[in-house]
Image (spheres, grey):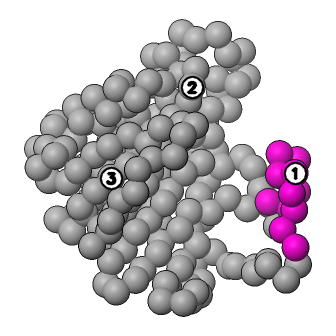
Amino acid sequence: SGIGKNFCVKRKITPENKKCVEKDESFCLGNFRITPLDVPHDSTDNVGYKIECDGVVFCIITDAGHVTEKMEQYIGQANYLVIESNYDEEMLRNGTYPKYLKDRISGGNGHLCNSECGKALAEHATDELRHVWLCHLSGENNHPILAQKTVEQVLRSYGLIAGKDFELDVLRRSTPSEMFELI
């Protein structure tokens, strides 16, 4: 598994607490039906998740270099969605990162920029979507206000209004958010 190979994970998961999951194969954990989905990223075994409980669908999609058809389907099924809005294209282009890293981040197996995130939402969100949280913002190549404004602008170009059609918030990078009740 990818997490077992990750050098950043100092405390490994014990065998009795591991469960191997297959992408696109649902499993149940208590009242939750969980479906892992493949996300295109340049590290090992990256997945997003669709979590269903009592008719409510929550999806989390991050570490995705581009939006796949499968991701589009999950965005279209979500009532609540956490999605990557990693970088601002201009900040990345004009930033201090070396070219190889800029190319990696903006490549098809890197990360989603703010405008790609907004386009994915605009083109695949349904009337059932209630709340979106932007996540995994770069500390060097993005800013929470910029991410939110860019996504809102893309949504407006499609006739969608954040705060009216669905709520839109940005999650903080290094501190926990407040609790949200998903109903």
Most frequent secondary structure within the magenta stretch: loop
* Position of residue 164 in the picture relative to residue 120 (left or right): left
Q: Amino acid at mark 1?
A: Lys
Q: Residue at x 47, y 75 (%)?
A: 51
Mark 1–mark 2 distance (CA, rounded to whole Å): 23 Å
Task: In the rendered view, tell whether residue 31 sits above or below residue 7.
Answer: below
Residue 10's disc number: 1
* Residue 119, horizontal then vertical, whole percent: 32, 44
Q: Taking the image as drawn, is residue 160 in sight? A: no
Task: In the rendered view, tell whether residue 113 sits above or below residue 123.
Answer: above
Residue interval drawn in magenta: 3-14
- Lower position in the chain sequence, tag 1 or tag 2: 1
Q: Amino acid at mark 3?
A: Val
Q: Taking the image as drawn, is residue 153 in sight? A: yes
Mark 3–mark 1 distance (CA, rounded to whole Å): 31 Å
**Element under disc 1:** loop
* Residue 41, horizontal then vertical, whole percent: 65, 49
Q: Is residue 34 magenta?
A: no
**Element under disc 3:** strand
Density class for disc 1 (Cα within 10 Å; few <14, some 14-19, many ≥20) is: few
Task: In the rendered view, tell whether residue 57 sits above or below residue 110.
Answer: below
Between tags 3 and 1, which lies in front? 1
Residue 132's disc number: 3
Mark 3–mark 2 distance (CA, rounded to whole Å): 20 Å
- The residue beneath circle 2 is 139
**Element under disc 2:** loop
- Lower position in the chain sequence, tag 3 or tag 2: 3
The image quarter containing residue 102 is: top right
